[in-house]
Amino acid sequence: MARLLIHFLDAGLGDFRWASIDEDRQTANIDWQPAGADELDLVASQNPYPLTIFLPQQCVYLTSIELPLRAGRQILSAIDFQVEDQLAQDIELQHVAIGDSSKNPVAIAVVERELMQRCLDLAQSHALRLVHILPELFLCPWPGSGVVLARGHDGYLLRYGDYAGLKCHAAALAPMLRLVNQSVEIESITCYGGDGEEFPQIDGFELERKNLDEARPGFLQAAVIDLQQRDFQMSSAWYALGRAWKSIAILLAILLVIGGYNKAMALQSMERELAEIRQQQFELLQPHLPEIGIEDNLKKALIDRLQQLQSNQNEQGFLALMLEFTRARANFPEVEITRVGYQGKDLVFDISSTQLTKIETLLATVQKQGVNATLVSLNIKPERSSGRLVLSGGDDV
């Protein structure tokens, strides 16, 4: 897989060196090309590959932090506080990236937040697909143990652990090695260089020379600390676009929440109104359909009852009419029956009562039961009213 490497030479992120590599075949002998700040557009357009940026090692502070057992999710905040104590600087201005969090002590890298932000802005402004930001130290090959020396830009990279190392000039190599020897026992130093490359003589230390073509770069398929973490997790040209639209997205989310809330409240209000209408319908139908409940299908029950009434009106015979009348008459003992007759398809009752309202109520009750009933020959007198109640129906079945 092709990848573009850009190694900035100083904290100004101006001049740089670059290389286009194939990750599967690349050795530690990288063919770097120098370039000025004004050439970044040209390099980006000619090499549209995923980008790894290397920051000068002097801009990245590598150390390790001992954490209490079971630090859990508080690990990052705990590291921030310890880094602030070590550097005696405002941690708000520093970005802390961690290595393998399963190990204790935990390796960390500290870099200025402003420098990280400028890396992201550069990648976005030049349409670069940024995937990693690494310290320069990880250009140094790493066999997994010992102490390794390799030439970096304007100095030597000295690596003595997965995440441990430094950069110094040739004149400072001897004192730096003696300092490292206090924490790491140095038996020999593996020096990686190109063909014919000479390394400075270091008294008291044995140097074993190897060719860069024999090793893999220290950042490929190896333990590294990618500085893109937490606030700088996003990469590629989409990062700045996301930042630019962040406030709009937040506003849109708020509007969606408000709209959803208003819709939910409107639906709740409609449900209450619907429940009230259903309750009113139930109260209207319940006297005529006492067997129904409020959860039943009121419309279906009403249709069934109307069909039944229509059928009753067309097919009621003498016995059915007598039964319906008897049921209704049971609630009106004040109404007297003086004569019962059956003529054609009509059942006729001669009724009388001292209260005219009882006669009228009896008529209404019979009609509510689905019977085609009429009151004829009504004779109203102060002491007693009388009339003929006619119930129309069909033949008995």
Image: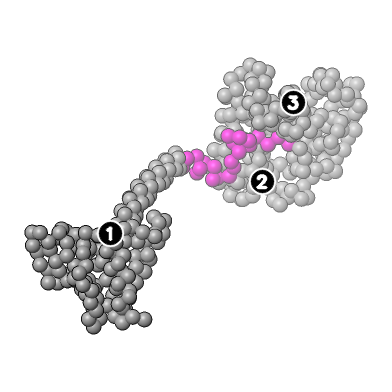
Identify the residue shown where x is 58% and y is 41%.
234
Residue linked to disc 1: 331
Q: Is residue 209 visible?
A: yes
Relative to residue 139, is residue 373 drawn left or right? left
Q: Which residues are magenta?
A: 224-246
Query: The C terminus is located in which quarter?
Result: bottom left
Residue linked to disc 3: 69
Q: Are marks 3 and 2 in contact (CB under 8 Å)?
A: no
Q: Decide which of tag 1 and tag 3 comes sooner along the chain.
A: 3
336, above or below 213, in the image: below
Amino acid on which the number 3 mark rests in the picture: Leu
335, above or below 12, in the image: below
Relative to residue 307, is residue 137 drawn left or right? right
Residue linked to disc 2: 4
Q: Nearer the viewer, residue 174 or 179?
A: 179
Relative to residue 212, is residue 291 drawn left or right? left
Amino acid on which the number 1 mark rests in the picture: Asn
Q: Are marks 1 and 3 in contact (CB under 8 Å)?
A: no
- Front position among marks 3 and 2: 3
Residue 180 place in picture, x, y as percent = 82, 22
